[in-house]
Image (tube, rainbow, N blue to C red):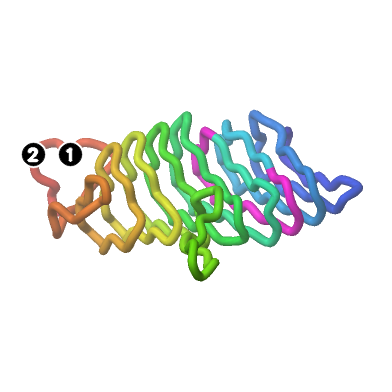
Amino acid sequence: MKTGEYRDEHNNTALLESDIDRPVKFQGNGNIVRVGKNVILKATIDIRGDNNTVTIGEWSVIDGYIGFIRVNDACVDIGHHTTIGGGSSIQLHETSHVHIGADCMISSSVLITVSDMHPIFDEITGNRINPGAAVSLADHVWVGYRSYVGRGASVGAGSVIGAQSVVSGTIPPKVTAAGVPARVIREGIRWERNFPSGDRIML
């Protein structure tokens, strides 16, 4: 799809400030996709529901899959200069919000989801015990290969999530966390996309 504004008979809208490699799939009404300038979008965006929103900030490189599965009034927003690797997936099966900040680096084969995809109930009370909840990654977060970021997860700015970790709670800023479930293993860290000239970052 070329840069421009597209609207169909169901009031689904794509506002594109960049050319994108794949079409946006709409099955519903009143959905909106916004893509900023200088974005490389290789991901499939598949929206099945009504009044959902996807926003992708400028200079981002997004691969993988972004899916709204029979859900209404949900939202995904991705900040500028963020990268998401191939095989990764952002999935919303319930009304909620996925926020990914600016300058985040999401590796390949990462799953980010606001729910467990199917409900689980207490046998005696009948109350649901696994409700969906929003996911938030602050600015400059690095999520390692094949990690799972689940419902209610929150990762603070500047943190690193180790490969194959499961994140389901709150991870503070500027730490390394890893494991199942992910736990803090080092505090006071700083990471960069590119290697510095020596072993230590020049401050």
Residue 81 as seen in the image, left or right of residue 65: left
Specify the amino acid type for callout 2: Asp
Decide which of 161, 49 is in the foreground and name it: 49
Residue 198 as seen in the image, left or right of residue 105: left
Quadrant for residue 105, please give it: top left
The answer for how far apart the CA atoms under marks 2 and 1 are is 7 Å
Magenta segment includes 50:
yes
- Give the quarter of the figure containing the C terminus: bottom left
Residue positioned most to the left: 199
Residue occupying the point 62% across, 60% down: 95
Residue occupying the point 33% across, 52% down: 167
Secondary structure of residue under mark 1: loop
Task: Look at the image and give the residue range highlighted in magenta.
Answer: 47-64
Q: Position of residue 8 (x, y in %)?
A: 87, 45
- Give the quarter of the figure containing the N terminus: top right
Q: Position of residue 168 (x, y in %)?
A: 36, 56
Q: Position of residue 94 (x, y in %)?
A: 60, 56
The answer to whether any part of residue 134 appears in the image is: no
> In the rendered view, would you say 125 is above or below 56?
below
Residue 89 as seen in the image, left or right of residue 193: right
Q: How many marks?
A: 2
Residue occupying the point 13% across, 49% down: 202
Secondary structure of residue under mark 2: loop
How many C-alpha atoms fall within 10 Å of the one at disc 2: few (<14), some, or many (≥20)? few
Quadrant for residue 158, please give it: bottom left
Magenta segment includes 79:
no
Would you name the residue on which mark 2 appears?
199
Q: Position of residue 87 (x, y in %)?
A: 47, 30
Residue 125 as seen in the image, left or right of residue 179: right
Would you name the residue on which mark 1 appears?
196
